[in-house]
């Protein structure tokens, strides 16, 4: 399990002259499986995808709030806004990561904290390759390069946007999920059944 975030933050502060201006909570584990996944799989997903962000904020915020500035970048996933078939631990914990980023922003923005939740879909990395047939079906067709995600992040930081969507179509999916959840769930279930048939 990951250690205390101070193991990262303290050496970074020392190397950077005493302060960290931007922190990217980028660690993630793509845990597949259903509700029946082993407890260790669920625990690791919670620890890496959610609690690592909580620990980092705990280590960083006292200094940031005292000086009135700091920037926390939470790498979530489109799964944190929507969901991902075949990956209950990943989907649930990415929802948690998004909720924590949202909570940080609404709680501390008046005290100078800038928070960004970046939520890409498929990105051409080893994590996409490891997602198997579900990733091939849902993510691979519109996958982008890591550099595209970085460009979207820099643009979002420059414009102080909380929600950063490297795949713009995610905004439409997110709106559909919110405005007509029954239809959205039915459509997602169609994808689930297609995956079960072809995967």
Image (spheres, helix red, strand yellow):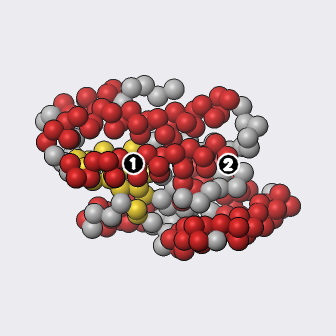
Would you call the spot at circle 1 few (<14 residues within 10 Å), some (14-19), or many (20 or more)?
Answer: few
Can I make out residue 191 in this image? no
**What label does residue 87 carry, if any?**
2
Residue at the image position 55 percent from the left and 36 percent from the top? 46
Which quadrant would residue 163 be assigned to in this image?
Answer: bottom left
> In the image, is residue 68 above or below residue 38?
below
> Looking at the picture, how far across and down is residue 160, in whole percent?
28, 63
Which quadrant would residue 179 be assigned to in this image?
Answer: bottom right
Q: Which residue is mark 1?
A: 103
> In the image, is residue 61 above or below residue 119?
above
> Looking at the picture, how far across and down is residue 158, in whole percent?
25, 65
Residue at the image position 19 percent from the left and 36 percent from the top? 63
> Looking at the picture, how far across and down is residue 39, in whole percent?
68, 29
Contact (Cβ within 8 Å) of mark 1 with mark 2 = no
Residue at the image position 82 percent from the left and 62 percent from the top? 193
Badge 1 element: helix
Q: Mark 1 vs mark 2: which is more N-terminal? A: 2
Question: Cα distance, mark 1 to mark 2?
Answer: 24 Å
> In the image, is residue 144 above or below residue 118?
below
Can I make out residue 39 in this image? yes
> Which quadrant of the rendered structure holds the C terminus?
bottom right
Badge 2 element: loop
**What label does residue 125 carry, if any?**
none
Q: Residue furthest right?
A: 197
Answer with left or right where residue 25 lies relative to residue 160.
Answer: right
Answer with left or right where residue 36 lies relative to residue 54.
Answer: right
């Amino acid at each position: 399990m990951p250690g205390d975030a101070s193991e990262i933050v303290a050496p970074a502060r020392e190397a950077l002259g005493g302060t960290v201006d931007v922190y990217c909570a980028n660690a993630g584990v793509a845990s597949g499986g259903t509700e029946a996944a082993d407890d260790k799989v669920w625990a690791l997903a919670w620890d890496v995808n959610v609690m690592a962000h909580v620990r980092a904020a705990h280590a960083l915020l006292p200094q940031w709030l005292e000086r009135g500035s700091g920037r926390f970048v939470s790498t979530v996933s489109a799964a944190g806004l929507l969901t991902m078939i075949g990956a209950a631990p990943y989907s649930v914990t990415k929802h948690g990561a998004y909720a924590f980023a949202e909570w940080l922003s609404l709680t501390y923005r008046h005290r100078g904290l800038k928070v960004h939740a970046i939520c890409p879909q498929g990105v051409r990395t080893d994590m996409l390759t490891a997602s198997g047939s579900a990733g091939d079906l849902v993510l691979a067709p519109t996958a982008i390069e890591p550099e595209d995600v970085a460009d979207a992040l820099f643009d979002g930081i420059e414009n102080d946007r909380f929600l950063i969507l490297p795949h713009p179509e995610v905004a439409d999916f997110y709106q559909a999920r919110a405005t007509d959840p029954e239809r959205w769930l039915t459509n997602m279930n169609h994808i689930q059944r297609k995956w079960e048939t072809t995967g």
